[in-house]
Amino acid sequence: MSEETQRRNRSGLVRDVELLELLADEDVAGDRMTGMGVRELAAASGRDKAVVSRTMATLAEAGLVDRDPVTLRYRLGGRLFSLAARTEEAALARRARPWLRRLASTTGETSHLCVLRGGAVVTLASELGHAAGRTQTWEGVSTAAWLTPSGRVLLSGHDGPSLEAWFATHGAGEPLPRARRRRIGPEGWLLARKRPHRLESLVRELELVRREGRAVSRGELEDGVVALSVPVRSFTGEVVAALNVSGPASRDEALRSWGPLLHEASRSLSGPA
C-alpha cells in the first residue's frame, strides 16, 4: 500500500471517529437515545451529506451505530459499547491481579475475577493458592451464571426490567437456583440449592444476595467445592465484576474468614479506575 493511500485511509478513519464522537456528545446530539439524522450529522461535521450517509451505513453494517428503522436516525451501536466494556475489563483485570495474588496467598485457595456475558460467567483472571491442589486456572472459562456465586452476585446488579429481560433470554426453560437458608453462627449463608423454573425464585435469591453483599455456594458447580463471591462496582455503583475465592469442602469453616479480605479487595477495586 502506498504512503498516499495510507494517509487517505487514516484521515478517513479520523473522520469516521468524529461522527461517532458527535453521536456521543450530548451538547450536539442531545438525548443520545434519540440520535441524529444524516442531515444533522453533515451540518455538525461540515461534511457532504451523501458522504456522511455512506459512512453511517458502513458503520451501521459494522454494528458501531444503530439506525432507527422509523426515524432513520443514528445512535451509538451495541458493538461499540461491547468493545468499550472489554477494554474496561482488561484494565480491571490488571488492577485486580495483585489482589488476586493476595487472596490466594492468604487463603491458600484459588481466587477469581469474573464478569457476566450473556447467560454465562467468564473468568477474566485467576490465581492458584498453595493449597489449591490444581495446576490449571479458570481464566477464559465460562460457566452458567446460576451455577456460581459469582453469577448471582453479577445478576444482583440488575434492576427489575433488566433482570426480566435477562431471564427471558437466558433463563426461561432452564433450571435456576433457589436458596435454602441455614444459620451458621450470627450470619445467614446461602447453602444447598434446588432448581426452580420461575423468575420470582431468582428475584428472591438476588434480594438475599443484595442484602448480605455476597453469595456462597457449596458443591453447586463442583462436588466438594465451596466458594464465596462479592461484587466489584463502577464509580456509578453498577456491579461490573465479581471477586471469588473457592476451595475444598474441608475448608467450609474457613469460608467465613475470607469475607473481610474479599470485601477489602472489592472496595479497593470499585469506583474510578
Image: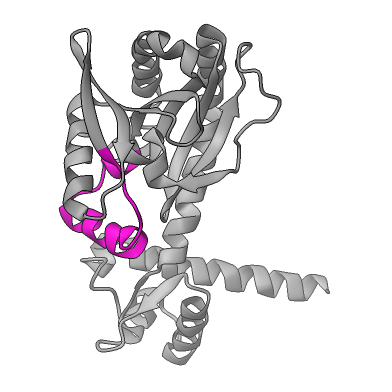
Report the residue at 37% width, 34% height from top.
149
Across and down, in percent, residue 255 comes to: 39, 14
Residue 78 vertical position relative to residue 224 in the rendered view, above or below = below
> Which portion, as a residue range, is magenta?
154-178
* Residue 262 found in image quarter: top left
The type of colouring in the image is: one colour
* Residue 240 found in image quarter: top left
**Residue furthest toward the right?**
2
Quarter of the picture containing the C terminus is top left
Residue 102 vertical position relative to residue 128 in the rendered view, above or below = above
Across and down, in percent, residue 28 comes to: 27, 67
Residue 39 vertical position relative to residue 254 in the rendered view, above or below = below
Q: Nearer the viewer, residue 37 or 131?
A: 131
Can residue 153 be seen in this snapshot?
yes
Can residue 237 be seen in this snapshot?
no
Report the residue at 41% width, 65% height from top.
78
Q: Nearer the viewer, residue 269 or 183?
A: 183
Please check the rendered image and state whether residue 68 is part of the magenta-colored stretch, yes or no.
no
Quarter of the picture containing the N terminus is bottom right
Q: Is residue 42 left or right of residue 59?
A: left
* Residue 153 found in image quarter: top left
Across and down, in percent, residue 272 comes to: 36, 32
Q: How many marks?
A: 0
Across and down, in percent, residue 66 comes to: 38, 75
